[in-house]
Amino acid sequence: MIISCQWPYLVGFIFLFLSFINIEEYNIHMDSTRLQQAE
């Protein structure tokens, strides 16, 4: 019963963690494109 009450928070935490990683990768990608445009 406790697990069924807490699993939405666990899923939300995992989702935020994955989205944070995706944002970091997106920022690195944008930086690389800026360097290419500068050249």
Image (tube, helix red, strand yellow):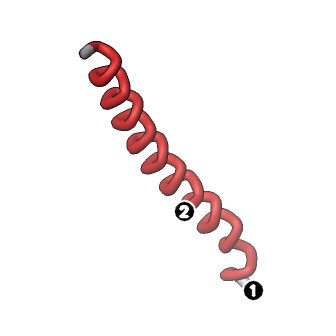
The kind of secondary structure element at disc 1 is: loop
Kindly identify which residue carries mark 1. 1
- Mark toward the viewer: 2 or 1: 2
Q: Check the image and name the residue furthest to the left.
A: 39
Q: Residue at x 63, y 59 (%)?
A: 12
Mark 2 sits on what residue? 14
Residue 9 occupies which quadrant of the picture? bottom right
The residue at 74%/74% (across/down) is 5
Q: Quadrant of the N terminus?
A: bottom right
Picture quarter containing residue 32? top left
- 11 w.r.t. 16: above or below: below
| Amino acid type shown at disc 1 | Met
Residue neighbourhood size for the residue with mark 1, other residues' Cα within 10 Å, grouped as few (<14), some (14–19), many (≥20): few
Q: Is residue 26 above or below residue 8?
A: above
Provide the secondary structure element on which disc 2 rests. Answer: helix
Determine whether 5 is above or below 36 in the image. below
The disc, 2 or 1, on the residue closer to the chain's N-terminal end is 1
Q: Is residue 32 left or right of residue 27?
A: left
Across and down, in percent, residue 37 comes to: 34, 18
Percent coordinates x, y for residue 24 in the rendering = 40, 41
- Quadrant of the image for the C terminus? top left
Disc count in the image?
2
Q: Are marks 2 and 1 in contact (CB under 8 Å)?
A: no
**Residue at the top extreme, as displayed:** 38
Determine the image quadrant of residue 28: top left
Q: x, y (%) of residue 13?
A: 56, 59
> Of the residues shown, which amino acid type is indicated by label 2?
Ile
| Alpha carbon distance from label 2 to label 1 | 21 Å
Residue that extends furthest to the front in the rendered view of this protein: 39
Tell me which residue sits at (50%, 56%) in the image: 18
Give coordinates of residue 10: x percent, y percent: 60, 67
In depth, the one of 26 and 18 nearer the eye is 26
